[in-house]
Amino acid sequence: MERSIAVVYEKGMLRPLSPLNLPEHTRLEIQIIEAGDESKRDAEKAYRILVQAGLVQPAIIREREPALISDKDRREVADAYGLAGSLSDVIIAERDEA
């Protein structure tokens, strides 16, 4: 069962603003969403419904793939090519040499 209830945070405890009608010692999972952000709450609820219906796949968090070349090597290559001037200057110089 999934539902939203209003609570208030007082003295380090979350207190429901209406009765929960649950058996004692019922374990629950709570998602905290500040009440002032109605659009965010509605968007998250819509997303969960779409995932449950199978219309949307949950986002997969992937680790950053390692670069094929290190940042240091990339900078060195960029600096080396940058010293040669623009690409058109390099082409013109190669044509003059031929």
Image (spheres, rainbow, N blue to C red):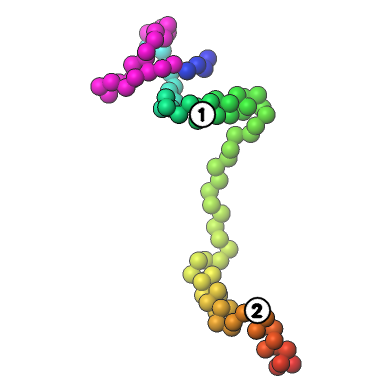
The picture quadrant where one finds residue 59 is top right
Q: Are marks 1 and 2 in contact (CB under 8 Å)?
A: no
In the rendered view, tell whether residue 93 sits above or below residue 47.
below
Percent across and percent down for residue 88 are: 67, 81
In the rendered view, tell whether residue 62 sits above or below residue 72.
above
Percent across and percent down for residue 24 are: 37, 8
Numbered disc 1: secondary structure: helix
Mark pair 1, 2: CA separation = 50 Å
Q: Which residues are magenta?
A: 5-24
| Amino acid under disc 2 | Leu
- Residue drawn at 39 percent across, 8 percent down: 19
- Residue drawn at 52 percent across, 17 percent down: 2
Q: Which residue is mark 1?
A: 39
Numbered disc 2: secondary structure: helix
- Label 2: few (<14), some (14–19) or many (≥20) C-alpha neighbours in 10 Å: few
- Residue drawn at 58 percent across, 63 percent down: 68
- Overall secondary structure of the magenta section: loop
| For residue 77, side relative to residue 27 (left or right) | right
In the rendered view, tell whether residue 33 sits above or below residue 96.
above
| For residue 7, side relative to residue 43 (left or right) | left
Q: Which mark is residue 87?
A: 2
Can the viewer see residue 60?
yes
